[in-house]
Amino acid sequence: MNRCAAIQRGMYDRTHAGFERLGLAVALRPWRTIATSLTVAIMLTGCVFAGQWEARIEYRDVPRGTEGFSLYDEVVIPLFGLTPRINEFKAYAADGGNVLRKELLLEALTVHERVLELSAATGGDGANVTTYADICVRSFEGGGCKMDNVFLRLALDRPSLLAMEQAEIDARFLAQSGGLERLLGHLEVDEEARTVRATNLRFFYLASEVVGAKTIAALVSGPPEAQARRVAWENEFLSLLNPAGSTELDAATPPWESATLVLAAVAGRSLMDEINRNLTDSTPLMGIAIHTEPGPNPNPN
């Protein structure tokens, strides 16, 4: 026991003497100490900004250097592209009835056409204009924008819809009803009466995702322009297709006004957006907090 106590006492004495010498050095050279401390802190904080990160859910727990990660980047993404941003809106009958009535289908088609015309001012001075055609997913270079709705599935355009009677419309939906469950809410089919009924229409617009900045320093310097263009268009999309005042977004498009349709929309806000926002907001504050955190009060009483 005496030997252990002697060892403990020796460690204490040496530690105490070391801190005493260190305190004396700080007291004799305060500005040199402050400069050295700030230099070390800035160097350590700078490592955070030089780091890399990965936002894709598939690879959040996979080391960047693995072969599987490299294959995903080099083979899968060039062949199939990144997971698209899915923007969707639903159109309901204002009276709660069947939304597959001819007059409601015509108005829903008008809303769809308005979405394709949406534009968002982008750039620092708003000089650039972004439309859906600029950001949409395409199966191949020069191909059409990828979207999904009953009008595309049934090859229904405005002239053909205007020329059809309600019975003909029902027959067209009835013939293809097996493949429309995703696009029609609460679809009901009456084979005997040869009628169909649905509570809402669903419209999907696929926007292409972009590869975000791979370093935290690049994120803090500002969001990528391509990402900002997509978010700006989605703001206009949400503003058009949701009730007035419900989104609180900075958008120039007024909400769609209708006495016969009720609209509701969601946009493809991705995990990348959320990580970008958290990093750009919190990383500078973290650096400031590290350098300005107060030390212990030398005179707590």
Image (spheres, grey):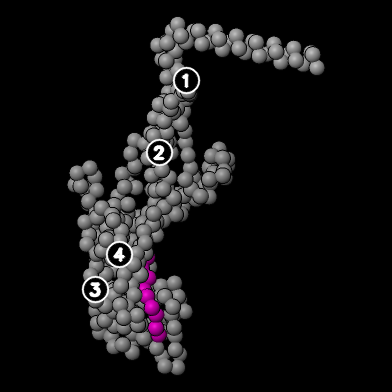
| Residue interval drawn in magenta | 196-204
Three-letter residue code for mark 1: Asn
Location of residue 40 with respect to 288 vertically, above or below: above
Three-letter residue code for mark 2: Ser
State which quadrant residue 34 falls in. top left
Mark 1 or mark 3, earlier in chain? 3
Location of residue 44 with respect to 59 vertically, above or below: above
Residue under circle 3?
258
**Left or right of residue 57: residue 236:** left
Question: In 3D space, how far apart are the residues under numbered discs 3 and 2 (Cα atoms)?
Answer: 42 Å
The extreme front residue here reads: 301
Residue under circle 4?
242
Question: In 3D space, how far apart are the residues under numbered discs 1 and 3 (Cα atoms)?
Answer: 69 Å
Mark 3 or mark 2, earlier in chain? 3
Three-letter residue code for mark 3: Ser
Residue at 66% of width from left, 14% of height from top? 12
* Residue 123 pos. (x, y %): 24, 45
Location of residue 282 with respect to 58 vertically, above or below: above
Question: In 3D space, how far apart are the residues under numbered discs 2 and 1 (Cα atoms)?
Answer: 32 Å
Nearest-to-viewer mark from 3 and 2: 2
- Asked if the stretch drawn in magenta spans residue 199, the answer is yes
Decide: few, some or many residues near mark 4? Use Cα within 10 Å; few <14, some 14-19, many ≥20: many
Decide: few, some or many residues near mark 2? Use Cα within 10 Å; few <14, some 14-19, many ≥20: few
Question: In 3D space, how far apart are the residues under numbered discs 3 and 4 (Cα atoms)?
Answer: 12 Å
Count the marks. Answer: 4
- Kindly identify which numbered label has been placed on residue 282: 2
State which quadrant residue 236 falls in. bottom left
Decide: few, some or many residues near mark 3? Use Cα within 10 Å; few <14, some 14-19, many ≥20: few
* Residue 242 pos. (x, y %): 30, 64
Nearest-to-viewer mark from 1 and 3: 1
- Kindly identify which numbered label has been placed on residue 299: 1
